[in-house]
Image: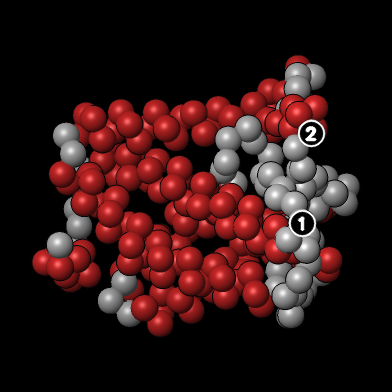
Amino acid sequence: MKEQYQKYLNKKHTFNRTTMIGIFCLLIVITGMFGWFYEFIFYFFNGGMKEFYWRGGNFLPWINIYATGSIMIYVLTYKYRKNPAKVFSISVISTGILEYFSGLGMYIIGNGMRCWNYNVEILNFGNIHGFVCLRSVLVFGVFALLLMYIVIPICFYLAKKINKNIFLTLSITLCSIIMFDEIYNLLIARILHLPRAYDVYKELGWKFVTFK
């Protein structure tokens, strides 16, 4: 295992295009679910440790901005993987930009809608207009280290060790399920006036951090 890890750091990996698609699909699933779990725990503490809240806008435990951020971090920092400090710094800056402009864009397009608001959250030092704060970007920087030095090496290892057809089938199928859930709640349910995840969870009596 140590030898495999050294190869990850020192050797340039050359997967073919279809295998890279499978790797990216797996990253999208893993990091989006990891982000959901992080927010599930964080908002428990943010709410005074009284209740758990479902986060994201989907039926499944997955949040899109974490998946988007993971692909961005991979693209920007893979060539610097032998330098953790550089990986951390680039990730802090890039995820801060992504988070700020994603939040600002949704606020403008959605007529004041906020999917997160650091103005009313704990540990919000360095808060800029409620869209980004120092705590968030530092946490994302730490997550980037976990991504580059744990998650991606594991994905590479699986891509090499598992039969290619099986690997692609599993990763693409899982990602497709997640994407259908996302598209349904973002577009299909709105256009056809069908129940969205929030509506169902509300009927079930689940606590749900709504978009405001």
| Whether residue 106 can be seen here | no
Q: Quadrant of the N terminus?
A: bottom left
Residue extending furthest toward the front: 50
Residue 133, image quadrant: bottom right
Q: Is label 2 in a helix, a strand or a loop?
A: loop
Measured from the top left, where is residue 94 in percent x and y?
Answer: 55, 68
Q: Which badge, 2 or 1, is on the more N-terminal residue?
A: 1
Measured from the top left, where is residue 4 in percent x and y?
Answer: 14, 62
Q: Which residue is mark 2?
A: 205
Residue that appears at 52% across and 57% down: 69
CA gap, disc 2 and disc 1: 15 Å
Q: Is residue 115 above or below residue 119?
A: above
Numbered circle sitting on residue 50: 1
- Category of crowding for the residue at label 2, using alpha-carbon neighbours closer than 10 angstroms: few (below 14), some (14–19), many (at least 20): few
Between 174 and 48, the one lying in front of the other is 48
Numbered circle sitting on residue 116: none
Measured from the top left, where is residue 112 in percent x and y?
Answer: 87, 51
Measured from the top left, where is residue 15 in percent x and y?
Answer: 21, 48
